Image: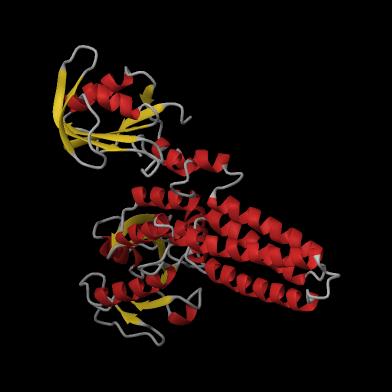
Amino acid sequence: MSADTIFALSSGQPPAGIGIIRISGPAAATTLRAVVGRIPAPRVATYVTMADPADGDVIDRGLALWFPGPKTATGEDLAELHCHGGRAVTAALLLMLARQAGCRLAEPGEFARRAFLNGRIDLNEAQGLSDLLLAETQTQRRAAMAMAQGDFSRRLETWRSEIVRLAALAESVLDFSDADDVPDDGMELVIAEGLRALGEQVRHELSRPAAERLRDGIRVVIAGPPNAGKSTLLNRLVGREAAIISSIAGTTRDRIEVPVAIDGIAYVFTDTAGLRNDTDDRIEQTGIDRAHEAIEAADILLWLGEPQAAPRPDSLCIAAQSDRKDWTMAEGGQLALSAVSGAGLDALLDAIGQRASALLPRDDGYALHRQQREALEHIATLIAEARDQSDTLVVAEILRLLRGAIDQLTGKAGTEDMLDALFGTFCIGK
């Protein structure tokens, strides 16, 4: 793949104030010289005329930058053309580049994939970059940046170094077990202690939040009996009429899900059918069944019924409809609220935010994707197996498997299908 030189518009789709076209590969220098007449000083923005080498037709005047490899974003020779961002200008430049020998339009994610293959980033940093491109909230952005900057990868490298050290100790026990100057028992204790400490670190890492929750949003489910004010509360929380409000019991027949971002956190608020046991309406009963499913899957449950009837011990019990004349605070209620007047809404949002923050990474932390978590669980299992072994030869073999598991997690081995899936989500210019 790296035999080709690739190019693409890496800035936003035109029209725009500026268009940035990236060129990466072995023919980048030749192509840049053909278009602007020279190779600018490395890493210095230089004012140039961009012309078609075929006939000298001037396409635009702007800036050119030259980045000789391997210390570039892709690990290859890299050039950038900064042009005016109109449709005609960018289209003419792209069409002209396509006619240059050895050049072709990049595939989605190909720049990032080359960066990975050339060792500029590893698989986890690439995952962080993908998350950063898709980030819609500040919480998502911060977590993605931590992953893209290599926080997780550096931790893995520390573990790998420790595994290599323990493997060397195990080999020394096996190779020199008959030598008087190699205390077998002492070495085995050192290996066992190293495995114990490593296992604790991996288990701690597994306690990190799930990236899927961060990406898809904290699931906040509003539940309670009919006419408890669930739909009114949903509309108030999301700031629009997302659910039909009626005094008729059973109006909400199915779950209504509304994604929204509040204070930089992504949520999915879900209104559910009123829970009761005396309905003979099959459609309403289906809605009630789905309400129970939503309650079980909720990250945060807002319960608008009697506190003692809350379906989960972690329910946030809300004494709703406090604007009614006959309203009284139910025993066990945690928050008084009127979704109609808005009284108590700020306190409710604060409570939701506090619970959500506990489910998300800290400001300087990252979250783990499913495949990362599964890999860590496999590593934890291997460490536990090694600790249970009394045969040093078996321990040495498990340590070898652990090195392979770390390499798979960083993308150094056995990841072709994963690469296709990951880099296929990138845009063409990334």
- As drawn, is 382 to the left or to the right of 7? right
Percent x, y for residue 362?
A: 38, 70
Percent x, y for residue 36?
A: 21, 26
Image position of 153 with respect to 346: above or below: above
Quadrant into which the C terminus falls: top left
What kind of colouring is applied to the model shown? secondary structure
* Residue lying farthest to the top in this orientation: 55
* Quarter of the view holding residue 346: bottom left
* Residue lying farthest to the bottom in this orientation: 331
Give the residue at x 26% y 64%: 236
Give the residue at x 60% y 73%: 200
Percent x, y for residue 214?
A: 41, 59
Camera-nearest residue between 303 and 416:
416
Camera-nearest residue between 354 and 2:
2
Number of labels in the image equals 0
Camera-nearest residue between 115 and 213:
115
Image position of 282 with respect to 312: above or below: above
Percent x, y for residue 77?
A: 36, 35
Image position of 221 with respect to 122: above or below: below
- As drawn, is 74 to the left or to the right of 177? left
Query: Can residue 291 be seen in this snapshot?
Result: no
Query: Can residue 416 be seen in this snapshot?
Result: yes
